[in-house]
Structures are given as structure tokens and as C-alpha cells.
Amino acid sequence: MPVLNPDIARAFDEIADLLEIEDANPFRVRAYRTAARLVLGLTSDLKTMVEAGEDLTELPGIGEDLAKKIIEIVTTGHCSFLEKLEKQTPPALTELLKVPGLGPKRVKALWHELDVETVDQLTRAAREGRIRSIPGFGEKTEARILEALQAQIAAVPRFPIAVAAPYAAALVRYLRNVPGVRRVVVAGSFRRGRDTVGDLDILATASADSPVMERFTAYEDVAEVFSQGTTRATVILRNKLQVDLRAVDESAYGAALHYFTGSKSHNIAIRRMGQDIGLKVNEYGLFRGKERIAGDTEESVYAAVGLPYIEPELRENRGEIQAARAGHLPKLVAMGDLRGDLHAHSKASDGHYSIRDMAAAARAAGLEYLAITEHSRHLTVAHGLDPVRLRRQMDEIDTLNTELDGITLLKGIEVDILEDGSLDLPGGILSDLDLVVAAVHYRFDLPRGKQTARILKAMDNPHFTILAHPSGRLIGSRNPMDVDMPRIIRHARERGCFLEINAQPERLDLVDIHARTAKEEGVLLAVNSDAHSIHDFDNLRFGLQQAQRGWLEMKDVLNTRTLKELRPLLAATMSR
DNA sequence: GCCGTTTTCGGCCCGACTGTTTTCAGTCG
């Protein structure tokens, strides 16, 4: 059982939880949390780094002690310090920390005063009215705990960003019409373009007498008002999405936008930089003593700490501050850079429109070329194409290309990668296509070694061009396949083929950190819609945002190439 | 536990809201 970065992050988070309950030095706790976040964001495998003898203390936030713990975890599969903590403090207590409203102090009190160690015991204690008897707790706290426990049973997972987007847009429109409101913008993880959002953070600039808070909590889609003050309020919408609104004066716009965009660890790093030069940074501005020296715009916030503007998609404290300082920030790929789409379906397989309709929609979306890539015969539920039907479609595309204006269709296939790593169609017909997109559509459960070997073998097929939705995950419903993604990416480099960032809202696959690995390895990525309808080209913006989060520039994205530049790149993968 | 143009000690990001308190602790983002 190989130890992956998320396993290490989980161990560190668990240590932090237990230390917190034990009332340990909060900065020691923070060190573990910081390390956990760092580990999750790494583009390379810690196990590989350890095996290569790399010095882990080079990583920011990892010192002698944490380096030793990482080495122990990757080599033995367990962490003796964590096990020791679990003997002192019941590990189930960390589950209680997840109950909203319960932090380490209250969990410790519940444990010591009432012997509550599990969620079940907590529920019982709350129902029996025993919690209110603990000093510092009251009836309201007890009721809130019970409420939170009941809500947690119907727990809401994070929302795919594309699902949250229309709710955000509607709220922004609504708030912009409130008297005294000047600007309304969605900040938080939504603005950073994360693949999912846990809540929406909305920032408004408004005059002091604006009724924006009252109007916000009175919004028709609000199911529950969680808290409401003069500058901040939290509500839950009917679809269970939590929305926070912060209102500030127009003059604080830049500082507040920066603050509420985050990420938390990016902000902390910026504040430290401010502190080093005698500045206090908060959501109202940058202050030297009492004098406010910046904060009207985000640019002014960065400038005050000596940095150029950093795009929201980069603000994860994954090296962007160092890059900014060194003048090495990437010039991120932009929506207008995309010239084509290399993965789309028509009604010949499981799409809903004719090829002609799809071509027209792609052209309307500003694209110059579109690859038609139906499923192959193995995927019978999607009416996958056999060689005869594919041959007929190729003829159809040739004809359409003589008729269409302003867009060129490419002949492709989304061929199934079979369980043994072979492709679902014979080389004879694959070699006549412009490109071969290949994907796994079944047996997602193979063990890591076999699954990785399956994909590596598929890539070795002389007709393989692009690996589609490489991890196979579906947000909220299917975990990513257990594969060695860095190895697959390295293999793509050696083989000279490409990987995809699939822009479907529930896929967004590759994920950002693997996109960044691909960039570092020099592997080009295709940002593809995987459109099944004429409306799906809109999703490209979400795929593009993942590319931006992976630090990709125009040169790193395959389908920013003109058709003339693209053809030889595709041909090179097919010519073996 | 980490870190160092205040380097091996003594710091460590900052503020809003709630509830149970009378001046603040706990939680959250």
C-alpha cells in the first residue's frame, strides 16, 4: 500500500486536531496544519522525493522534525507520534471537531465533563439536555449543536464551481440593485477558480446607510439566516449552498477583495511580508501605524509589499509569491487564446446534436477547429462506433468540411482503453484519423499498479494522441482512479503525446496540481469541452480556469495552436 | 514546530459574530 501525499496530509491534520484538543501550543498546531496544506498542494510525490534522497527541509514549513515524520510515514506506512497521541486522546474526538460550532476547547470540555467521545454520544447528551450544564455552555449552544448534528446527517458536499456559478450570478445581480451599493463581486474559492466551492464569499462596497445586509438576508432564495451583523452576514440558500456577504466602504475595495479572495495561506504570507516592513494588513487596507497607505485596489495591496499583481487562480501559496518576487509569474493562458476543441460528441454516439450543429456552435464560441470524437464500440450504452460507422462518419466530415465556413472539423475518436491496455479499434482505421483521444470508461477499480500499467500500455499504441479525463473522477460521485499520475505524465513526455483537461463541470480532470506537473515536465495539455450538446462549449471557461490554476501559459496548451501549427503536432504522435 | 537583512530565541495574521458573560472566550473565515 503506497503512501500518497494526501495520506501524509491527513496524518498531519489528525495530529493537529489531537494536539489542539490537548491544548498544545497553538503555533505548534499551526505548523502541522501548514504542513498538511503544503503537502496537498505539492506537484511531486513525497515518497518519490524521499526515495531520491531529496532534502525535505527545503520545503517551506517543513523542518527537521516534520521531515523525519514524513520519512517515517512513507517508509513504514504509519506515524508513531500520531499513534502515541491516539492513545492519550480518543481519535474519535476529531470527528466532533467537524461539527460546526465545536472547536477544540468545547470538544475537550464535552469529553472531560460528560465523557462524550463520539458523535452518537454527543447526540444523546444534547437530546438529554446535559450539555447546557457544562460551564461556558448554555441552552442556545446546546440547541445549536443538536441542529448542526441533524444538518450534518444531510451533509452537503462541496458544489462543483459550474453548479454554484448561476446562483452566484443571480445574487450579484440582486445585490447590485440595492440602494447605496456600488460594487458586488464574488471572491473566495469561486474567484480563485477552484474545481469545487464550499460556500460563496460575496463582497459588496456600499455606503454606511445602505440596507444591503437586510436585503441580503431577505433574498428570496435564502432558507436560513445563520448570522447577521453590520458588515457581515451568513445565510444558507434553499439548495444548501452557504453564502457569506461582507460589506465595506468603497475605499477599502482592493484590500477587502484581496482579503476575501484568499486563499487563507496566501493571505497569511502576504501579511507576514507586510509585517516585515512594518505594515499591518487587514481587510480595510494596509496601515503604517494609523496611516493608511494602500488598499483601494488589489494592485496597490501587492505593490505596497513590493510585489506585482498576482492572478487569483495562483493564490494558493504554492510558490506564486516567490515567483512574483523573482519576476517569474506565468502569463496565464486566457480564454481568447483557445483556438479549437479536440473532444466533442454528436448524436452519432451519445451527443444530442448533429455534427453540423456542433460545428456551428463551436464557431459561435469563437473556435477555429473542432474534433469530432465519438465513443468506440465497447461503450455500447453510448452507441459507440465500430469501424464501419466510423468510416461513414469520416466521409461525412470530409463532405462537411467542403461546405462549412469559418471552422474546420477534425476526424477523431474517443476510443476505449480496454482492461488489458489495448485500444478498442484496430490500428488500420485509427491511422486514418486526425487524432485519437483515448479514455478509460470501465474497471475504474483496478489496483494502482495494474491501472497505471493499463494506461501506459495504451499510450504506447502508435496511434494514441490524447489521454482524456485522465483520472476518471466524477466530483461527488466517483473517486479518481488509483494511478501513478506523475509517472503517466512522464511517460507522455517520453512518448510525445498529450493529456487533457476535461472541462465538464463534474470532471475538471486533470486537476490543477497535476496540470502543473505536466507543465513542469513539458507535456502539452488540451483544454477540451467533451461537449455533448451545443451549449457545452460554455464549460471551456471552467476547464481553462483549471489550466490557469496549474500555472499554464498559452504555450503549454495544445489547442491554443493554429490549425496549421496543430496538424504536425498531432501527426507526430500518430506516425510511429 | 518553524524560522532568521532583529539568526539559535522569541516571535509566529487579523477581525467579525455569537453566546454567556459584565469584559471575554470560542469559533470561524
Image (cartoon, coloured by chain):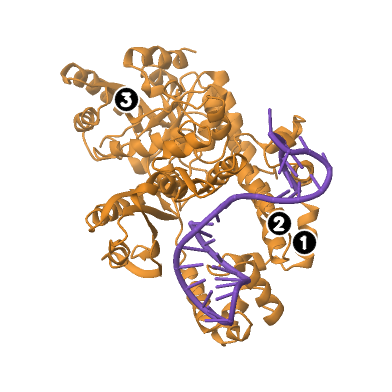
Chain colours: A orange, B purple
Both on one chain, marks 3 and 2? yes
Both on one chain, marks 2 and 1? yes
- According to the picture, the residue beneath numbered tag 1 turns out to be A85
Of residues B16 and A442, the one nearer the viewer is B16
- According to the picture, the residue beneath numbered tag 3 turns out to be A340
Q: Secondary structure at mark 3?
A: strand
Q: Amino acid at mark 1?
A: Leu
State whether residue A169 appears in this view. Answer: yes
Of residues A562 and A58, the one nearer the viewer is A58
Q: Callout 2: few (<14), some (14-19), or many (20+) C-alpha neighbours within 10 Å?
A: many
Q: Amino acid at mark 2?
A: Ile
Residue A320: x %, y % from top left: 54, 34
- According to the picture, the residue beneath numbered tag 2 turns out to be A15
Q: Chain of mark 3?
A: A
**In the rendered image of this protein, does residue A359 appear above or below residue A446?**
above
Residue A246 position by quadrant:
bottom left
The reply to whether discs 2 and 1 touch (Cβ–Cβ < 8 Å) is yes
Q: Callout 1: few (<14), some (14-19), or many (20+) C-alpha neighbours within 10 Å?
A: some
Residue A499: x %, y % from top left: 47, 28
Residue at figure coordinates x 27%, y 56% from the top left: A175
Task: Report how far apart the C-alphas of labels 3 and 1 lie in the structure.
Answer: 54 Å
